[in-house]
Amino acid sequence: MTKQKEILALFIILILAIFLRFWQLGKVPASPDWDEAALGYNAYSILKTGKDEYGQFLPLILRSFDDYKPAVYAYLATLPIKFFGLNLWAVRLPSAIFGVLAVFLVYLLVKELFRNSLSATRWALLSAFLLAISPWHLQFSRAAFESGVGMTLNILIALLFLKGLKKPWFFILCALFAGLNIYVYQAEKIFTPFLVLALLIIWRKDWLKLPKKYLAVALLTGAILVLPFIKMTLSNPEIFLRAKGTSFASDQTVFLSRTAQKLIRDINNNDYLGLILDNRRITYLQSFLSGYLSHFNFNWLFIAGDDARHHAPGMGLLYLAELPFFVYGIYWLIFNQKHRQAKFLLFIWFLLAPLPAAFTSGVPHAVRALRFLPVVQVFTALGLMNFWQKIEKFPSWKKFPVFFAVLGFFIFNFGYFFNQYFVQLNYFTSQAWQYGYEQAVKEVKKIEGNYEKVIVSNQPYLDQSYMFFLFYLKYDPAAYQRTGGTVSGGFAEDRNSFDKYVFRPIKWSEEEKSKHILYVGRADDFSVGASVHKTINFLDGKPAIVIVKGE
């Protein structure tokens, strides 16, 4: 392939990646979930006051809903919010940019990994193309997920390491981004150190020959960035509340109770093998292995996915058309005698990908296991290219039917995904995306002057409603920090307030219903005959939020 053709092909792939990530970015998905709203408002708060909603100055960790989110994404969102205002498009913009960047970086990484192969350029372009149209990657490039940023930085870290083998100063940049990545997303605290360790082991003979001054500066750079995290961890153990809450052993009482019951039964039955296998440490190991292996489930990957916010309705995380070539790519790479270092890195990366998620409940989990990308696309690209090289030897009457059958299957699969995501997703998943707040806030804003108080429910599917009102009202962060932000708002509180808004459960039968109070809640928060001002529906027509006048 000539250089001109390569540049043209890469340009077309990047244009496609940009279109798929930016088209209707603020409209599909139809609304922010609570994490997107929290990241957006905290970015707005930092931009306006230098503090998060709780009054923490330039935080590295956002307390948010007591889930202690890494703050990097919020900082990335400050610039778009400054120029485009506090809106959903601006909040999602960093994710879309990093999604496109990932496509370009995969192209560079694959070229570097297989630079001694005549097919490196084709493998690189095809890997980039597959990532550009990947349902899994698009899902997390079009919403404010920190995981997508962390995934992109992992690709960059590997690329900078390989570049550093020829130009050692790249190692300093590699250490810089590796250190920063642990502040991007929780899973990177586990995955990124293992990735760096794998790179060091696989290419140990190469980097040990390099000038020590570059290695020393890189090590110092990494240490400077990691030390604040270690200090913060030791001094603020509450930042692990989210990790503890999502751990498979989070419910210690139930978890250990089951183990104790089994041990009692084993003792009564003189079951010595059972006494060994039902030990709580073995039980923990079984849970970990079960969570780890669940991420290789065919149904999860190719058919059903998991949470409705993690995939397009009616399909999994990957194209079914990719499956045979994904498997063939793995097979080809295992038995290929060349590219040993690239092979080891890809397989180690692939096996490390589900590790952070394996410690958690709710597995398999598409967000925490996003690190499967881009290795899945690289395997698939290798399988496709080597499959094509085999059928190229066929006579035309055999070759072209096979080619068009494969091409047709991919086009059908992509067309189905495009329809399911851009046409069907909002209809089927608007409830999962907590749709209705924007419309509710606009309506409340019109009539709130007629009321002394607005009571908003914070019960299930209206959880953390205060954050959506802050987001859509663009409420002054300094005012919120003075009146509510520093003392409430987390999962632990059942009440929050600012200005005339109070966020708490609505107990309609017990309320003192005053005509000076406006209520915002779920349909079942109110009795039949309540004076409904407006009902806002989910996009499938079911009631989402009801605005009721006090009686």
Image: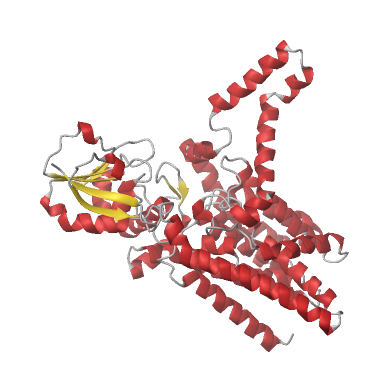
> Residue 515: percent from the left, percent from the top?
11, 43
Q: Is residue 62 above or below residue 333?
A: above
- For the residue pair 3 and 549, the one nearer the viewer reads as 549
Position of residue 305 in the picture relative to residue 488 (left or right): right
Q: How many marks?
A: 0
Quadrant assignment, res 510: top left
User: Residue pushed farthest top?
Assistant: 268
Which residue occupies the foreground of this view, 490 or 435? Answer: 435
Q: Which residue is depicted at the point 73% across and 19% down? A: 275
Q: Residue 164 appears at what percent x and percent y?
A: 70, 66
Nearer to us in this view, 310 or 537 = 537
User: Could you tell whether 454 is left or right of 35 in the image?
Assistant: left
Camera sees residue 97: yes
Where residue 364 appears, as percent x and y from the top left, is 61, 46
Q: Is residue 327 above or below residue 461?
A: below
Its colouring scheme is: secondary structure
Question: Which quadrant would the N terminus be assigned to in this image?
Answer: bottom right
Q: Position of residue 323 (x, y in %)?
A: 71, 61
